[in-house]
Image (cartoon, rainbow, N blue to C red):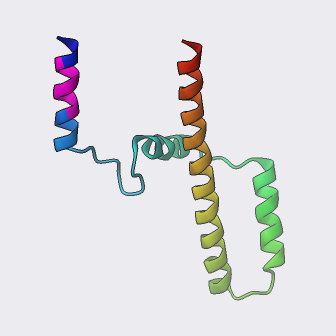
């Protein structure tokens, strides 16, 4: 009976894929997006690194600084998202090994 419900649910999801939002392609990425919204605080190390970046860009035109900072922020977010997703995967694998 349960197997039949699971089969029906899987078919329904396959026929009606979930909408993860505009910047997520999986449930894990969607979880990261929500996590990031609720925990969007930088550590002292991150703040210091950005301060160093701004010091190195001193004297550059504002438009050029914005272009660089936008690229750096996008890179940081993708790196953080990849770490979050892989961390969750490892956690799931560990929980399966414990059982």
39 within the magenta span:
no
Residue 18 in which image quadrant: top left
Residue 34 lies, with reference to residue 1, above or below; the image says below
Residue 43 falls left or right of residue 81: right
> Quadrant of the image for the C terminus?
top right
x 61%, y 72%: residue? 71
> Residue at point 79% right, 86% down?
59
Q: Position of residue 84 (x, y in %)?
A: 59, 42
Residue 23: name its quadrant: bottom left
Q: Is residue 21 positioned above or below 95 on the image?
A: below
Give coordinates of residue 9: x percent, y percent. Answer: 20, 28
How far from the left and from the top, in percent, is residue 2? 22, 13
| Most common SS among magenta residues | helix
Residue 30 picture location, percent across and down: 43, 44
Q: How many marks?
A: 0
Q: Which residues are magenta?
A: 4-10
4, 78: nearer the viewer:
4
Q: Is residue 1 left or right of residue 37?
A: left
Q: Compared to 63, does 20 lie above or below?
A: above
Relative to 53, 62 lies left or right: left
* Residue in view at x 46 percent, y 46 percent: 29
The answer to which of 27 and 66 lies nearer the viewer is 27
In the rendered image, which quarter contains the N terminus?
Answer: top left
């Amino acid at each position: 009976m349960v197997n039949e419900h699971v089969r029906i649910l899987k078919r329904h999801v396959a026929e009606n894929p979930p909408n993860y939002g505009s910047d997520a392609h999986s449930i894990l990425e969607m979880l990261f997006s929500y996590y990031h919204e609720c925990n969007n605080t930088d550590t002292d190390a991150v703040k210091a690194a950005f301060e160093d970046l701004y010091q190195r860009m001193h004297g550059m035109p504002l438009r050029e600084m914005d272009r660089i900072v936008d690229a750096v922020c996008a890179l940081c977010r993708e790196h953080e998202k990849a770490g979050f997703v892989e961390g969750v995967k490892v956690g799931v694998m560990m929980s399966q090994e414990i059982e």
